[in-house]
Image (cartoon, helix red, strand yellow):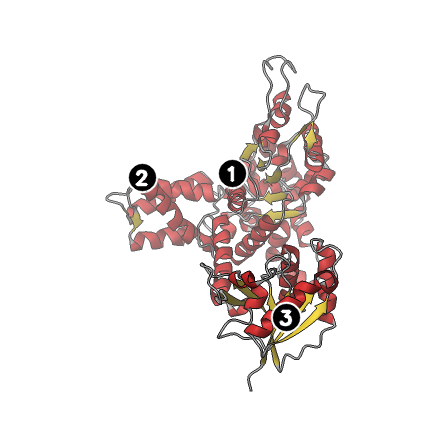
């Protein structure tokens, strides 16, 4: 047995109005409900303020009796103090539905959303979407040309989006496109990195809070910040500009002026007003790379600008405003900088809401191959010349690039430069094995000084010669593990994997820190110094090594 069709709707005070024979020349949505040949309701539940619109209600009922004599019309006297006040309208409709005796096994229900105020239509939508109303939406439209007896058209809308595969697919596809934008179109394979990008896409879409991108030089912090801006721009969330500055380049009095601007005559050489980068980023996104290099005064000013959206340009006694979103980048441990008094803890607390550590290329070796293809495609587009590896050369390059022998200290900058050299030197657009071998030798020399050099030579300089072979072999392995590990704790877990299971209390990071200190090294040096330790650091390692050797008991 077919279910009864029941339509709920509000009397259209304007659309349903009309008297005399001329009213039939006009499309009236409630009356038209009874005029469709393929959809005739068994019952219409009509909500109306009967005390104010009793005459119109009676006329509409009479007309429905003529157009659909088998359709029952039930009038519900519904009073709304203000039909344009959202809270009151929603409460009124919610209470009406809560008190209605629905019989979903016997009846199909529809909400006629064509009549009523825009507020009531929105409320009907929300109540249907939340399943407070166990039915579907019914949208009716007038005919293109008015004819007596033409009911127009109708459409049934089911808000269960699971039934709309195409819509669901479009939402999913858009989300994938947004994430692809953040990854620069590179099909990355590293699970942790992909999960991080998924969260950044969600946060970038829903929030304007500051972000902090942490990671070594060349890990892609600047590119990711630019892509976050592009995503927000695409979604019409940031009408302003993308403004980028490397804080390591800001020195002395010029740092304040660059960031916050100055007034004419603020200092010698200030011949005109300067807006500053924070004002230039108004309604846009400001990326402060290497934020750990900012001075204390600049940090204090930046904190106030973040919290209050106001600041004083240099030499001015009048505040200016700038509403920008901030993304900060750093390759430093800002928590350690706070402990050393070099970075403000209140500024870090403001930045630390959304913090994302970008792994270096050595920690994402599975992403080397897709990045290889991306870089070659980019070079081909820019140079208008297609370049590809032959199969053997590609296999040889990837074998080296993904092995522990390739530390990729410069991260994606090293990889991009390497592939650019290979593409430039390729004959007839093909990268051959001999070219790959030459490039591998070049990379080895770049990273280690020579193909046979130890990383300890770069880290310790002349102090490395003072090591016994016993200590040198052990320390070299420790350093290599540290170089490819994401953190001091991760390196410690790998190095002490057996002994840690036999200890009641494990602090692998502290054990590793003390081991490195015996050789005059620390975590920061090992991570940043392949090679690159300052001469002073090398010289200072000598007495510490000598002290270690004197105290060692074999």
Callout 2–callout 3 Cβ contact below 8 Å: no
Say which of marks 1 and 3 sits in front.
3
Residue at numbered disc 2 = 383
Residue at numbered disc 3 = 61
Residue 203 against residue 505 in the figure, above or below: above
Residue 57, numbered circle: none
- Extreme-left residue of the structure: 428
Please state, as top left, top right, bottom left or bottom right, where the N terminus lies in the image: bottom right
Q: Is residue 30 visible?
A: yes
Q: Is residue 450 visible?
A: no
Q: Position of residue 454 (x, y in %)?
A: 49, 43
Residue drawn 54% across and 52% down? 197
Q: Position of residue 273 (x, y in %)?
A: 60, 18
* 546 vs 197, nearest the viewer: 197
Q: Position of residue 104 (x, y in %)?
A: 63, 79
Q: Earlier in the sequence, mark 1 or mark 3?
A: 3
Q: Quadrant of residue 108?
A: bottom right
Q: How far is mark 2 from mark 3, CA to CA?
A: 75 Å
Tell me the SS state at disc 3: helix
Residue 220 against residue 162 in the figure, above or below: above
Q: Quadrant of residue 211?
A: top right
* 219 vs 126, nearest the viewer: 126
* 452 vs 394, nearest the viewer: 394
Q: How far is mark 2 from mark 1, CA to CA?
A: 33 Å
Q: Is residue 239 left or right of residue 383?
A: right
- Extreme-front residue of the structure: 20
Label 1: how many Cα within 10 Å (few below 14, some 14–19, many 20+): many
Q: Earlier in the sequence, mark 2 or mark 3?
A: 3
Residue at numbered disc 1 = 531
Tell me the SS state at disc 2: helix
Residue 44 against residue 174 in the figure, above or below: below
* 549 vs 234, nearest the viewer: 234
């Amino acid at each position: 047995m077919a279910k009864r069709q029941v339509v709920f709707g509000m009397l259209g005070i304007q659309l349903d109005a009309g008297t005399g024979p001329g009213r039939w020349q006009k499309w009236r949505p409630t009356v038209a409900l009874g005029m469709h040949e393929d959809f005739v309701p068994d019952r219409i539940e009509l909500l109306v303020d009967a005390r104010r619109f009793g005459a119109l209600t009676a006329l509409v009922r009479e007309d429905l009796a003529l157009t659909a004599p088998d359709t029952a019309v039930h009038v519900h006297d519904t009073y709304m103090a203000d039909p344009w006040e959202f809270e009151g309208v929603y409460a009124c409709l919610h209470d009406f539905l809560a008190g209605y005796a629905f019989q979903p096994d016997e009846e199909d229900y529809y909400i006629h959303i064509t009549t009523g105020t825009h507020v009531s239509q929105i409320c009907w939508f929300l109540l249907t979407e939340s399943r407070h109303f166990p039915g579907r939406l019914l949208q009716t439209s007038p005919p293109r040309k008015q004819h007596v007896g033409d009911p127009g058209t109708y459409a049934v809308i089911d808000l269960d989006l699971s039934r709309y595969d195409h819509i669901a697919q479009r939402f999913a596809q858009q989300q994938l496109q947004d994430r692809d934008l953040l990854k620069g179109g590179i099909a990355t394979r590293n699970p942790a990195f992909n999960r991080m990008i998924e969260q950044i896409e969600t946060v970038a879409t829903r929030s304007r809070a500051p972000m902090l991108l942490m990671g070594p030089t060349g890990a892609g912090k600047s590119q990711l910040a630019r892509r976050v801006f592009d995503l927000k721009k695409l979604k019409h969330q940031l009408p302003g500009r993308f403004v980028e500055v490397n804080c390591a380049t800001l020195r002395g009095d010029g740092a304040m002026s660059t960031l916050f601007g100055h007034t004419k005559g603020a200092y010698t050489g200030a011949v005109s007003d300067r807006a500053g980068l924070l004002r230039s980023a108004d309604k846009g996104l400001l990326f402060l790379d290497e934020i750990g290099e900012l001075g204390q005064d600049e940090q204090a000013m930046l904190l106030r600008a973040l919290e209050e959206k106001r600041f004083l340009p240099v030499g001015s006694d009048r505040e200016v405003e700038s509403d920008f979103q901030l993304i900060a980048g750093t390759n430093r441990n800002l928590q350690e900088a706070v402990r050393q008094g070099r970075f403000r803890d209140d500024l870090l607390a403001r930045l630390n809401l959304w913090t994302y550590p970008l792994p270096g290329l050595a920690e994402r070796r599975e992403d080397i191959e897709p990045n290889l293809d991306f870089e070659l495609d980019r070079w081909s587009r820019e140079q208008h010349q297609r370049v590809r590896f032959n199969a053997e050369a590609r296999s040889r390059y990837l074998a080296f690039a993904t092995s522990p022998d390739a530390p990729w200290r410069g991260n994606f900058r090293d990889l991009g430069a390497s592939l650019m050299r290979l593409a430039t030197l390729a004959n007839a657009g093909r990268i051959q094995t001999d070219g790959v071998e030459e490039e591998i030798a070049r990379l080895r020399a770049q990273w280690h000084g020579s193909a046979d050099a130890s990383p300890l030579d770069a880290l310790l300089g002349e102090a490395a010669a003072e090591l016994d072979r016993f200590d040198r072999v052990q320390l070299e392995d420790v350093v290599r593990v540290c170089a490819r590990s994401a953190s001091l704790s991760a390196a410690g877990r790998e190095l002490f994997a057996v002994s840690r299971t036999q200890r009641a209390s494990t602090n692998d990071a502290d054990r590793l820190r003390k081991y490195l200190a015996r050789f005059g090294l620390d975590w920061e040096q090992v991570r940043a110094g392949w090679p690159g330790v300052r001469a002073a650091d090398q010289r200072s390692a000598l007495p510490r090594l000598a002290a270690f050797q004197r105290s060692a008991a074999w």
